[in-house]
Image (cartoon, rainbow, N blue to C red):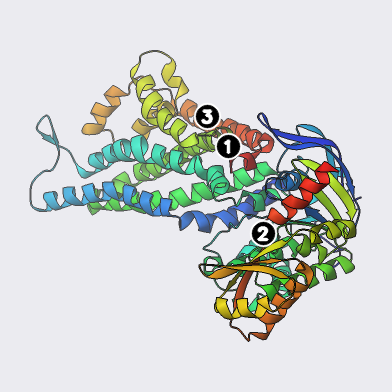
Amino acid sequence: MSARPNLPAPPTFWNGAVRVFSLSLGEMLWSRRTVFLMLVTGMPVFVALVLRLVQSSGITPVRVNSTPVDGASIFGGMIWIFFLRFIVPVLGVFYGTSLMADEVEDRTITYLFTRPIRRGAVLVGKYLAFLVCTTLVVLPSVVLVYFLLVPLSQVARTFVAFAADLGLLALGLAAYGGLFAFVGAALKRPLVSGLVFVFGWEQVALLVPGYLKRFTVAHYVQGLVPHAMPSDGVAAVLQAVLRNNPPAWLCIAALAGIVAVSLWLGVKAVESREYVLDQ
Amino acid sequence: MIVASEHLSKWYGQVSGLNDVTIQVPPGITGLLGPNGAGKSTFMKLITGQLRPSKGQVRVLGEPIWGNPALFQRIGFCPEQDSFYDRMTGREWVTALTGLHGFDEKAAGEAAAKAIAAVELTEAADRKIGSYSKGMRQRIKLAQAIAHEPELLILDEPLSGMDPLMRRRTVKQIKEWARAGTSVLVSSHILHEIEAMTSNIVLINNGRIVAEGDVHHIRDLIDEHPHTVSIRAQQTHAVARELLADEGVVSVRFEPGGLVVETARPDAFYARVTDLAASGRLGPITEITSPDDNLQAVFRYLVKQ
C-alpha cells in the first residue's frame, strides 16, 4: 500500500452530513427503538379502529353536549391529543437525545470522528436521518387514522386540512428533534433531561399564565393546531381553549428558529466535547 | 516525524492518563508497548484527535490533530474496541466509512473491495458483521483503516483475538504496507508481537515514556523473565504434551478450553505454536494471548534503573 496520489478532497460540511445520513438511516430504521416506537404510533390506529367499528354498528362514538362529533373533528382531536402532545415530543426525545449517545454507548463514534469530516456534520447527518426515520414511523399511522375516521365523502373537503396536519407534524418533529439533538450532544444524561422538559416543564409552563409558555416548543406547535383543524364540533371547543395563541407566522418562525439555533448549538457542542471520555 | 509531542499530558479529573510526554516518532513502523492501563490508549486517543491535551501539544504529520478533521484524509485508524454496526455486511460497512473520505460510491466500493481482499476477507465480505468471529472483526477493522490508502496507519492492538496463522499473515501484511511507504504506529502489550514487526519501540508505563529506541536491549531483559502464554485449543492435553517437549517451557497449567504455558524462550515458543497451528496436526489452535504480567516485570526493572 502506498500513499494515494489522487485522493479526493475531503467532503464539505453538507456533503459529509449527507454521507453520514446515508450511513445512519438504515441503522436507525431497523433499530429496536424504531420497532418500539412503531408500536406506540400504532395506539391511535387502534383507537381509530375501535371508533370505526362502533360507528359501523350504528352508534355515534363521540358526542359533545349531546351533539354528535363527525369523523373529521375526531381526527383533528386525535392529531392534537395523541400526535402533537404525545407522540411527536416522545419521538423527539427518544431519537434526538440518542443521535450521539447511541454512537458513544456502542463505541462506534470513533469510526465517524476519525474521518475527514467535521464532527458537526455527523450530528447534522444523523439529525436528517432522524427526520426521515420518524416521518416514516409517523406517516403511516396518521394516514391510517385519517382514513379510518373520515368518511370517503368528506375526504375532498378535509384533505387540505389533513395535508396541513401532516406539515405540522413534520414541523413538530423537526423542532423537538433539533432541540433534543442539542441536548444529546451537550449533556451527559440527555434522556432524563429530555423527559423532564417534555413531561415536566412544558406541561407546567403551558398551564401557568404569562410568558413562560414562550419557552416551550409545545406553545408554538399548539399555536398552529387551530389553523390545521376543522372549525366545527370539538374543534371549536379546542380553539376556545387555545384562543391566546400567537399568529401562525410567528409559530412557524419560532419553530424554524428553534431548529436552527438548536442545531447550531449542537454542532458547537459536538465539536468541543471529548466523547471517548464517556465510553 | 509522523508524530511529535511536547510535554503532552492528559488528566481525567484528578487522575493522570498521560504525564509530560515528549516524543518524536519517525517514519516507518514504531511499536508502542505497555501493559494495560499504562497510558497507551490515552496516547492513541490524543494522536487521533479524540481527546484534547490537558497540557502540551501533539502534532501528527506536522499538523495539530485536535479539531483538524481534514488530516484524517492522510491517516487510517484501527481502534481497539470491538464495536461495529452489526446489521451491516463487512463490505457495506467498509464502503460507507470509505465514502466519508470523499470517494464517490463506485470508487468507495472499489477501495473497500481492495482493502477487504488485503485482509483476506473477500469470501465473508457480504456476510453481516454480527456473524463474524473475533479474528474476522479485527481484520474488517483493519480494512476500514487502510481502504483510503493513508500515509499513516495507527493500529491499536490490531492482532488481538486473531488466530496464530492470521497473526502471522497480518504481521507480514503490516510490514508490506510499511515497505510500500506507509508509516505505522502500532500498540500492543505483547513485546513479541511488536518485535515481529519492528525493532523501533516506545515503552510506556504509568503514563510516562519509560524507554524508546531499539528493541534488542529490552528483549534481553524480557528473556530473564518467564513469559506466560494462554492458548485456546480443542485438544488441550495433546498440545500440552507436545509443548512440554520444548526445553524452554517451564510449566503448563490447564484451564477451561485451553492451557497456560510459562516459557523462558518466548521467541522459539511462539514460532513453535504457530507451526503447530498451521499443521493442524493436533486440531485447531484458535487463540494465543499473553497477559501483560511479562511486561510488568520488565517495567518494574526499568523503572528501578
> In the visual, does A60 lie left or right of B88?
left
The residue under the point 34% across, 37% down is A86
Chain identifier of the residue bearing label 2 in the image = B
> What distance separates the C-alpha of mark 3 from that of mark 2?
37 Å
Q: Are marks 2 and 1 in contact (CB under 8 Å)?
A: no
Q: Is residue B288 above or below residue A237?
A: below
Residue type, mark 3 in image: Ala
Q: Position of residue A112 (x, y in %)?
A: 66, 51
Q: Position of residue A178 (x, y in %)?
A: 53, 37
- State the residue position of label 3: A253
Both marks 3 and 1 on one chain? yes
Task: State which tag comes first along the sequence, 3 or 1.
Answer: 1
> What distance separates the C-alpha of mark 2 from that of mark 1?
22 Å
Residue type, mark 1 in image: Ala
**Front one among A203 and B192:** B192
The residue under the point 86% across, 60% down is B220
- State the residue position of label 2: B97
Q: Position of residue A52 (x, y in %)?
A: 17, 51
**Front one among A219 and B130:** B130
- State the residue position of label 1: A185
Q: Secondary structure at mark 3?
A: helix
> In the visual, does A96 lie left or right of A149?
right
The residue under the point 50% across, 47% down is A131
Q: Secondary structure at mark 2?
A: helix
Tag shown at residue A33: none
**Front one among A120 and B106:** A120
Q: Secondary structure at mark 1?
A: helix
Crowd band around label 2 with a 10 angstrom C-alpha radius: few (<14), some (14–19), many (20+): many
> What distance separates the C-alpha of mark 3 from that of mark 1?
24 Å
Residue type, mark 2 in image: Leu
